[in-house]
Amino acid sequence: MIHFEWPWMVVLLPLPLIIRFLFPPVEVVNEAALRVPFLTEFSMHSNDDHHINVQYKLIWIAIIVWFCLITAATRPQWLGDFIEIPISGRDLMLAVDLSGSMEEEDFIIKGDKVDRLTATKYVAGEFIQRRVGDRLGLILFGEKAYLQTPLTFDRLTVKTLLYESAIGLAGKSTAIGDAIGLAVKRLREKDDKSRVLILLTDGANTAGEVEPLAAAELAAREKLKIYTIGIGADEMVMRSIFGSRRVNPSADLDEKTLSAIANKTGGRYFRARDIEQLEQIYALLDDLEPIEKDVQRFRPQAALYYWPLAIALLLMCIVVMKRHSLGVVNARGEA
């Protein structure tokens, strides 16, 4: 539908008539002049009716120009249909382990063996896509923790930067405590009812300046809820020239510490041994931290004032050219 932002501007429509009646035209003083009769002057009288018709047309064009200018001044806009934007008010930070152990290929996606980071990207990417209305952030940690993406509603950017992450990008070790500390620093100024950290790792804390449990106590004081995910299979077959043997690729996973971190902050600890369990965990996180909250309504607007303004300018050019041509003709007739 069309909406006029300043409809009161229509009161200016009769302004030219008001000026015309309040300020009468200046009288033209006829001065004596020497006129030399030529044959062309006799032909001018035959064109008087034509000139009068042109003058009337110019007056009507001027009226249309004024109407277009007033229409443009009312700021016409095209209003589209209402669009509902869900706003949850939640600040959700993802912390993903990029240490060397994440290159262990103990996950299977569509029949292909993949490393742990690839499996994380595969599942977490879909999780990010579903979090409509949340402000998301991304922390990547290895030997050190880095803020890859600050809190933003731009889910596509968060997902893209997660997909671009690589094993060893932040070092080969694992600094779980530093990752939690960085999340606390970034979320401490936010609403204490909507701050969540999802931390995914496959090992134990082997680097960093902050102990994980000390960082968890700080997070608890700041009312930051932490969900921890331990990733990695319990068993896989290793083949060598001496035969096959079964090993535990997740022997270094510190489940006790991860559980303690979650318990201290009011979160939960999850164990993902394969891609199906990892998908179930992220689906469960959707239930624990539901998306549906307040909905804001947005109505797209498109300005239309330039259409009547362009028509007015075009018609004004026509009026000016016509008046100029009439002036030239009159000048030749009086010569």
Image (spheres, grey):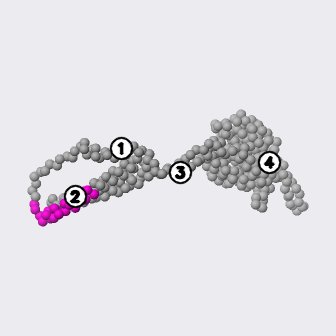
Q: Secondary structure at mark 3?
A: loop
Which label number is shown at residue 81?
3
Q: CA distance from mark 3 to mark 1?
A: 30 Å
Of helix, strand and loop, which one carries label 2? helix
Nearer the camera: disc 4 or disc 2? 2
Task: Decide: is 46 above or below 295.
Answer: below
Dot placed on the residue nearer the N-terminal end, 3 or 1: 1
Q: Is residue 126 magenta?
A: no
> Residue 40 in the image: x percent, y percent?
15, 65
Crowd band around label 3 with a 10 angstrom C-alpha radius: few (<14), some (14–19), many (20+): few
Q: What residue range appears in magenta?
A: 36-57
Q: Earlier in the sequence, mark 3 or mark 2?
A: 2
The percent position of residue 183, horizontal first and vertical second, equals 68, 41
Measure how far apart labels 1 and 2 are at the Cα level. 31 Å
Specify whether 304 is left or right of 278: left
Q: Residues within 10 Å of mark 1 (few under 14, many from 20)?
A: few
Q: What residue is rendered at 10% in x and 54% in y?
A: 33
Say which label, 1 or 2, has the lower sequence index.
1
Residue in view at x 63 percent, y 50 percent: 155
Decide if residue 59 is in sight here. Answer: yes
Residue of label 2: 52
Disc marking residue 271: 4
Q: Are marks 1 and 4 in contact (CB under 8 Å)?
A: no
**Residue farthest toward the right in the current orientation of the protein:** 242
Task: Find the distance from the CA under tag 1 to the CA under tag 4.
Answer: 71 Å
- What's the amino acid at mark 1? Val
Q: Which mark is residue 11?
A: 1
